[in-house]
Amino acid sequence: MKLIDLIAGARPNFMKIAPIIDALEKARANGSHLRYRLIHTGQHYDRNMSGSFFKQLGIPDPDINLEVGSGTQAEQTAGIMLGYERVLLEEKSDLCVVVGDVTSTMACAITAQKLHVPVAHVEGGIRSGDWTMPEEINRMVTDTVTNWFFTTSEFANENLRKSGVGKDRIFFVGNTMIDTLLKHLPRLQIPPVWNNMGLREKHYFVVTLHRPNNVDAELNLKNLLEAIIQGARGLPIIFPVHPRTAKNLERMGIKTDGVHLTEPLSYLEFNSLVKNAFAVITDSGGITEETTVLGVPCMTLRDTTERPETITMGTNELVGTNPDNLAPHLERLFAGKWKNGAIPPLWDGKAAERIVEHMTVLL
Ligand code: UD1
């Protein structure tokens, strides 16, 4: 038997790890030598950010919870490393699987590799080039201590090759986040805001904002919201608010008339809202992948992206962080001239199966 640690810490990790668990369970039922333990770092800990995802996506209770909780980047990194090191010293695993680019990803990858546990990085190799984003630092550091890369795009493969990673360590498997989306599409749930606001298909916007660059400076957040409200031409704007943004909106006393704020939504509710939206305006990376697959126009309020295929192939456009940039994009949208987009290669719902096939050979 070989023991695999699956690391999940923050909201965008849960939908990436769920299909890997499904595929490992399936393999186990067929006599596989792979077993796993699920380790939740506790970076996200409340029902809205964590619990509801476990429930809806059928993720089993974690075997271990490091309960790191909130804190600065350094506090979280240190807390997770201390907690995971204890776990490994008690029982060493044969592989540490990390997903995405959050603090938990980097902290566990370093801890594992220092104890000579090989690391596999799901979604390895993507790069925005923007070192002001904590996620970019996490990606770079994680990838320097990763043995095997399970990648989502040719862009990621190329980045890895350019940085000297041998082809034998790169496995282009597709996108586990899309595995989850395709699996759950038939059971999306209409959120209460749909009836409360009398929403109609393709007649409202969905907005999400949580990047420190956009939401930590009062003027930036205020100007972005104003540009969105003005540009929406009276269509309802539904904004499920991330805890960081909620705290800032309150602290800064920013008026949000014209925007309908909600708590962070569950997975099935959020994607139901996105699927039926006229367009999404966001600074998230993962959502640009989901809108690409759902064929929903998406405007990204960032200056860079680590997911260029959502633009070259998908329905996403990089608007930038200057609020003035939004107007021409909205013009195009209202004129019915938004691109149609296509689905990137291997985003077919089978990425996790491919990952488990590779792990079966590697371990
Ligand atoms: C993290 C990830 C980011 C991801 C985002 C999705 C890093 C560096 N960033 O950023 O990549 O897109 O999650 O949500 O890992 N909080 C709660 N409840 C929770 C969790 C957090 O209220 O369950 C609060 C915290 O107290 C903190 C804020 O939300 O004030 C931010 O949480 P944190 O984990 O520090 O980073 P995110 O901004 O969520």
Image (cartoon, rainbow, N blue to C red):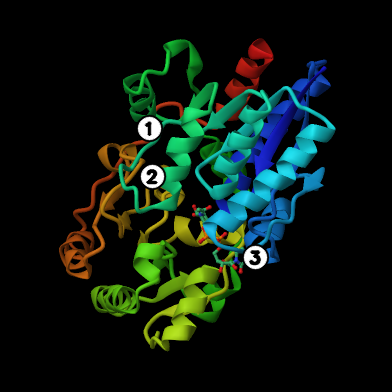
Ligand 1: which quarter? bottom right
Location of mark 3 (residue)? 48
Q: Earlier in the sequence, mark 1 or mark 2?
A: 2
Please report the residue visible at 64 percent of the width from the left and 36 percent of the height from the top: 111
Q: Which mark is residue 292?
A: 2
Residue 115, horizontal then vertical, whole percent: 68, 28
Q: Amino acid at mark 1?
A: Pro
**Mark 3 CB in 8 Å range of ligand 1?**
yes
Q: Are marks 3 and 2 in contact (CB under 8 Å)?
A: no
Q: Earlier in the sequence, mark 3 or mark 1?
A: 3
Q: Amino acid at mark 2?
A: Thr
Q: Residues within 10 Å of mark 1 (few under 14, many from 20)?
A: many
Q: Earlier in the sequence, mark 3 or mark 2?
A: 3
Nearest the camera: 299 or 120? 120
Location of mark 1 (residue)? 344
Residue 147, horizontal then vertical, whole percent: 55, 21
Nearest the camera: 99 or 78? 78
Give how far apart the Cα atoms at labels 3 and 2 are: 24 Å
Can residue 171 be seen in this snapshot?
yes
Can residue 350 be seen in this snapshot?
no
Q: Amino acid at mark 3?
A: Asn
Nearest the camera: 216 or 324? 216
